[in-house]
Image (cartoon, rainbow, N blue to C red):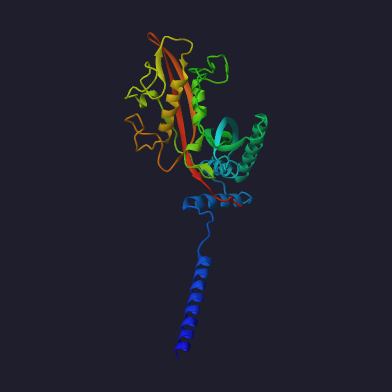
Amino acid sequence: MKKLLYVLIIIGLTMALLYSCKKDTDKMQKEPTNEQQYTDYEWEIYYRLQAYKHNSSLKSSNPISLDSAEWYMETQFNVEEATTIEPYSLIQKDSTYYTLILNGSGMVELSSMNTMYNEILDDVDSIEYVISNPEAIPVFAHLELLSKDENEAEMMLVLGIGNYFSGYYAPFYDIDDWYYGNNLGRTDGEYLYLSDAGQELGKRINNPFFQYFQPGAYVEPRESVEVRYDDYPDIYSLNPESNVGYLTYYEVSTSFPSPVLENEELTFYLNNLHNIVYTYDDQTVANSDQPGKHPPGFVFEYLTTWTDTDPITGGYYYEHAFTIHYATRVNIPLPQ
């Protein structure tokens, strides 16, 4: 009897084990795999583009507003042509101008949009060929409305061109003493008419490697923000140039045509500009009592630099000013 009892126990344990294994197998089969998960916002972008691409092939489609036309062309280009899969560095920006034909009532026929969009694609191919860089890729594009009437709209496409680059900012070495601006080059005579201190700062910052980066595209840019010298006083007197009391460059000087920014100064401005770009606007920038410029929910896209000079009593003032562009980044399947 005992022997029979042991046999029954063993059979029962075996059946329980087999049932448990089957449950685990079924559970594994039913759990979702690690496929790309998209947010509701990304699906919204996807379905809007998919519907637009479907309707654009229909001759009977109704005209749409100019704002909508601008959004569809810009977003389609960014998702389909300017998606990047790895960190990159911006190497050039280019502006191209277009006339979008309207229907006489300020609305846009989809056929007119298709014509302009195809012109954009042709021009982008030409730009990449002109710069003779086989590694160049479009990394963002923005359409800007310049003027309009009921019959046509004048538009400008700002195209960012970059190449894949996964690395940190190039340091400023001992040789890197640059003239302030005006493309006056380096003090050793190199890069005359090609670069200057402001350009070198902007070139380094335009490397979004430093934020969380995933494959995707920039869409729906936020209103850009400016950085001027008086936004960020040097409250701890850390600037290696005693004549400058700010975290970005501003100096009153008798020097003309251009003062020199030495490599230690440029390193100081690079570090502080980085902090300004990436610190959220509800947090305080390091070495400052002022908030950053980064709006939550957006990512840094690119930065533009301008160098301002004007005569004042007793000399001139020199300034590096910046405009920071932020946008939303999405990673969606290509609309069919």
Q: Quadrant of residue 119?
A: top right
Check the picture and name the quadrant holding the N terminus.
Answer: bottom left
- Residue 178: horizontal and vertical position, in percent? 50, 18
- Residue 46: horizontal and vertical position, in percent? 54, 51
Farthest-out residue, bottom = 1
- Residue 132: horizontal and vertical position, in percent? 67, 30
**Is 114 located above or below residue 286 in the figure?**
below
Counting every numbered tag in the picture gives 0
User: Residue shown at 37%/16% (left/top)?
Assistant: 242
- Residue 52: horizontal and vertical position, in percent? 57, 49
User: Residue shown at 39%/17% (left/top)?
Assistant: 241
Residue 156 in view: no
- Position of 14 compared to 232: left or right? right
Toward the viewer: 144 or 20? Answer: 20
Q: Quadrant of residue 291?
A: top left
- Position of 7 compared to 131: left or right? left
Toward the viewer: 151 or 161? Answer: 161
Residue 167 in view: yes
Toward the viewer: 209 or 6? Answer: 6
User: Residue shown at 43%/33% (left/top)?
Assistant: 277
